[in-house]
Amino acid sequence: MSFDQNSLDRLRELGRQLPQKLPDPEPATSKSSGNRRGAKGRDHQGPQLHKVETEQDPDVLFRELMSASEDGTVPDHLMSRLRRLEAQRQPAARQALQEPISSTDLPAPPRVSGKSNGKNTRPSRPNVSPGSEEESLYVAFGQLLLEDDEDNA
């Protein structure tokens, strides 16, 4: 490879500058990093964590994981963390379901109109004119229901 005189001179200058040692990073002082607080008020040492690493609500964590992932894939350690948080939440939900329901917590039963006194188990004929298309549709539907009952029996 051939260089012109200017490029060759520039390479020699850079070659003289390269062996210099880089300065050491400044040690962390208590004022710069020790006084920063994390999300929960504890001292935050080290790199700041992403919300998917600190979130405790499984629903919010799931949304954060989906927004952080470009293609919908999630690392195994984050999936196991999500499962663990959901498992911690589920015992509380199960306990709430197992508590007896008192009658004071239930809504009042609906008021019954004067004509109907409960569920009518007999089929009632709709008010349609005989021989109309609507009546033939009702008849066809009733036959389909009867055929379905015969197949299930």
Image (tube, rainbow, N blue to C red):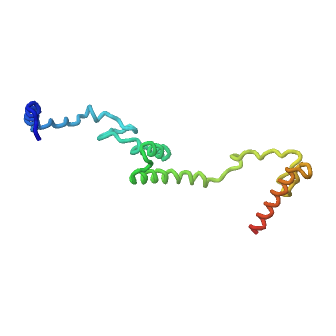
Residue 138 horizontal/vertical position (percent): 84, 54
Q: Quadrant of the N terminus?
A: top left
Tell me, yes or no, if residue 20 can be seen here: no
Q: With 62 as the anchor, is 153 left or right in this view? A: right
Residues 103 and 85: in front is 85
In the figure, residue 140 lies in which quadrant?
A: bottom right
Residue 31 horizontal/vertical position (percent): 26, 31
Q: Is residue 9 above or below residue 113?
A: above
Q: Residue at x 32, y 34 (%)?
A: 36
As drawn, the residue found furthest toward the top would be: 6
Residue 46 horizontal/vertical position (percent): 29, 41
Tell me, yes or no, if residue 25 can be seen here: yes
As drawn, the residue found furthest toward the right would be: 130
Residue 117 horizontal/vertical position (percent): 86, 51
Q: Quadrant of the C terminus?
A: bottom right
Q: Residue at x 23, y 34 (%)?
A: 29
In the figure, residue 44 lies in which quadrant?
A: top left
Q: With 53 as the anchor, is 143 left or right in this view? A: right
Residues 116 and 33: in front is 116
Q: Residue at x 44, y 45 (%)?
A: 65
As drawn, the residue found furthest toward the bottom would be: 153
